[in-house]
Amino acid sequence: MIHTDALHRHLYATDASIFREIPAGVAYPKDADDIKALIRHAREHGLSLIPRSAGTSLAGQCVGTGIVVDISKYLTKVLEINAEERWVRVQPGVIRDELNVFLKPHGLFFAPNTSTSNRCMLGGMVGNNSCGTTSLVYGSTRDHVLALHTVLSDGSGGAFQGALARAFEEKCRGTGLEAELYRQIREMLAPPEVQAEIRAQYPKPEIHRRNTGYAVDLLLRSNLFTPGGPDFNFCTILTGSEGTLALPPKLRCTSNRCLHHTM
Ligand SMILES: Cc1cc2nc3c(=O)[nH]c(=O)nc-3n(C[C@H](O)[C@H](O)[C@H](O)COP(=O)(O)OP(=O)(O)OC[C@H]3O[C@@H](n4cnc5c(N)ncnc54)[C@H](O)[C@@H]3O)c2cc1C
C-alpha cells in the first residue's frame, strides 16, 4: 500500500538535512515481494523510489518527489549469525547499536560507529558507506559488507558477493539483469585507457570515506583487473551508492571480535 494522504507526505518531506520536498507517497514494505511491487508501480508511473531507513543523512538523500520507501518499520530482523566465521545476516532496518547488543554475548561487534548509531540502520549505513570514530582502525561500512541480496530496477533479484575470477565468468554467462550487470562492468572497465583515466582522476585512495560517485576505482583493484587483488565484489560499489543502484532487503556483514570496543 502506498500512502498518498497529506499527513504522510508532509511527514516524509524532510530528513536530517536542510532540504524539503513533498514526496508522491510513502510505503512501508514488509518483504522483497512488496519492494518488487513498488518497483513495478514506480516504472509504470514514471516515479522514482527513495529508500529510507532512519533518515539521518545530511545531504537530502532521503528527500525527493518520488515514493519514499521506509524500510525501518518491518524489515528489522537479525536473520542469522555465524559467530565462528564472524558474520551476521540482517534486514536493512536493524539499528546499528541494537545489532551490537545482539552481538555482544558472542564477543563480537559491528565496527562502523557513526554519531547516530543509536538510531541509524544497516540499510542506510550501506547506502552512504557510514563510518565514524573507529574508522581509522576498522574502516567504513564498505569494508564490512560481505553480501547484499537486492531487488534490481526490473524487479528481479540480484545476490552480490565476492566472486573468484571463474565465478565471475559464470555470472557473465547467465541470463537476466544480474548477468547483464556483470557483463557490462567487465566491458566498461576492461579498456586500459579507461582504467588509466579512472586511476588518474579519482580521489586519492587514502581518502577513506568518499561518496562522490560510484567507487569503480576500487573495483579496478580486484583480481579481475589487478593480479593479487581481492575478489571482485559488486558490494564495493553498491555500498555508498545511496540507494540508486538497488534496494537490498537483506545483507550479510562481518563482525569484529570485541577487543578494542567499548559500548
Ligand atoms: C548529528 C549527526 C551526526 C552524524 N555523524 C555521522 C558520523 O559520525 N559518521 C557517519 O558516517 N555519518 C554520520 N551522520 C550521517 C548519518 O547519520 C549516518 O551516515 C547514518 O549511518 C545514516 O543511516 P540512516 O539509517 O539514517 O540512513 P538514511 O539517511 O535513511 O539513508 C542513507 C542512504 O542510504 C539509502 N538507503 C537507506 N536504506 C536503504 C535500503 N534498504 N536500500 C538501499 N538504499 C538505502 C538512502 O536512500 C540514503 O541514500 C551523522 C548525521 C547526523 C544528523
Image: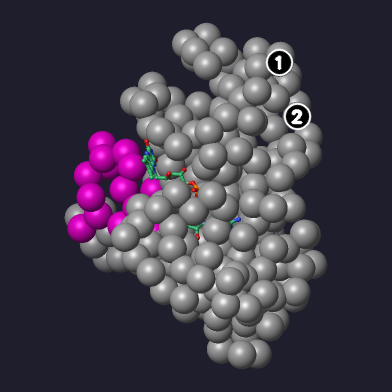
Q: What's the magenta bit mostly, secondary-structure-wise?
A: loop
Residue 206 image point, x, y percent: 26, 37
Q: Amino acid at mark 1?
A: His
Q: Amino acid at mark 2?
A: Ile
Query: Is residue 48 at least partly visible in the picture?
Result: no
Residue 60 sits above or below residue 119 on the image: below
Residue at position x 49%, y 13% from top?
A: 262
* Direction top: furthest residue: 259
Q: Quadrant of residue 255?
A: top right
| Residue at figure coordinates x 43%, y 25% from the top left | 138
> Residue pushed farthest front?
7
Q: Which mark is residue 106?
A: 1
Q: Is residue 175 magenta?
A: no
Residue 113: name its quadrant.
top left
Q: Residue 233 location in percent, x, y?
A: 55, 49
Do residues under tags 2 and 1 come within 8 Å of each other at their CB atoms? yes
As helix, strand or loop, the secondary structure at mark 1 comes to helix
- The answer as to whether callout 1 falls within 8 Å of ligand 1 is no
How many other residues sit within 10 Å of disc 2, few (<14), some (14-19) or many (≥20)?
some
- The residue at the far bottom in this view is 45
- For the residue labelled by badge 2, is the local secondary structure a helix, a strand or a loop? strand
Q: Residue at x 65, y 41 (%)?
A: 94
Question: Which region of the structure is painted magenta?
Answer: 201-220
Q: Which mark is residue 81?
A: 2
Is 214 magenta? The answer is yes
- Using the numbered discs, state the Cα–Cα distance from disc 2 to disc 1 in whole angstroms: 9 Å
Give how far across and how far down residue 15 sits, in percent.
Answer: 44, 58
Q: Is residue 251 above or below residue 180?
A: above
* Residue 62 at x, y percent in the picture: 47, 62
* Mark positioned earlier in the residue sequence (2 or 1): 2
> Left or right of 92: which side holds 63?
left
